Amino acid sequence: MQLKFQHLVRLTFFFLLVTLTVSGCKTAKTHYREGLERASKNDYTGAVREYDAAIAKKPDDGSLYRLRGVAKYEMEDFDGAFADFSQAILLVPTDAESFKFRGDIKQNRGQYKQAIEDYNQAITHQPNYAKAYNNRGLNRARLKDTKGAVSDFTQAITLQDDYAVAYLNRANLRMRQKQYTPAKEDYDRAISLDPNMVQAFYNRGVLNHTLKNRKSACQDWQRAFELGSPQANDLIKRFCK
């Protein structure tokens, strides 16, 4: 009985060793796939852990840094994401997506000119990158380059006709320029593409109020309030009662 027990212990120990050895031999590609799987489930902490392991095995793969950067970006670890996107660009100088994300971080830091430089690079390497045009337009608008901003939003829409946010951004600029008819057309289009876009309803309400269309303005603000805008309720109380 004692011999059988010892034999069983040895077999169990051997099995554990085999299991540990196999688990420790995952390839970079396996970690990459598991990172994608975790990211698809919004488990960004787990995704970063898998990308860490993949990078340890394949440190010269720029795509791994980009993917880890995206996961960190979603976790709001912007400094870590910035470092990863920069390393991805160093390894793959034509990585449009890393340029775009790094531009987004610079935009959030208020570095609008530097952000535009990154969006320029993203567009150079991927001329059909609608998001890069849209985001460059936002930074141009912040730098008072209205003409350039409208041009970028228009190009984003040309590349992606269902890009609701680009319609909203162009509408906001057009309303600021008092181009009310095309602004309203853009708000209408944005809302048709995304019926839950609270800012589009709110701003279209402001436009309708400017045009003395009180009923439509109140309807838009009511919808904006229903979608979660307390500011819209303030306008309803002031102008619609």
Image: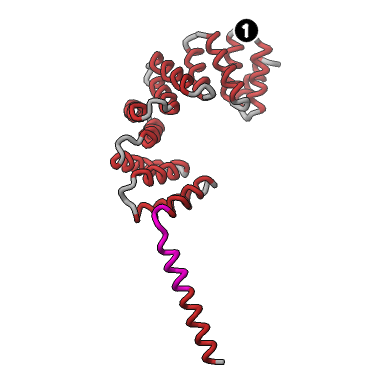
Residue at the image point whose x is 33% and y is 42% from the top: 88
Q: How many marks?
A: 1
- The amino acid type found where label 1 is placed reads Lys
Q: Which residues are magenta?
A: 16-29
Q: Is residue 26 magenta?
A: yes
Residue 207 in the image: state x and y as whole percent.
57, 13
Q: Which residue is mark 1?
A: 212
Q: Quadrant of the N terminus?
A: bottom right
Residue at the image point whose x is 42% and y is 19% from the top: 152
Residue 76 in the image: state x and y as whole percent.
45, 42
The answer, for residue 1, to whether it is visible in the render is yes
Drawn side of residue 184 relative to residue 110, left or right: right
Front one among 160 and 73: 160
Q: Is residue 53 magenta?
A: no
* In the depicted structure, whether residue 148 falls above or below residue 110: above
* In the depicted structure, whether residue 230 falls above or below residue 241: below
Drawn side of residue 232 relative to residue 13, left or right: right
Residue 23 in the image: state x and y as whole percent.
45, 64
Q: Quadrant of residue 147?
A: top left
The answer, for residue 109, to whether it is visible in the render is no
Residue 166 in the image: state x and y as whole percent.
49, 22
Front one among 144 and 102: 102
Q: Quadrant of residue 238?
A: top right
Residue at the image point whose x is 57% and y is 17% from the top: 187
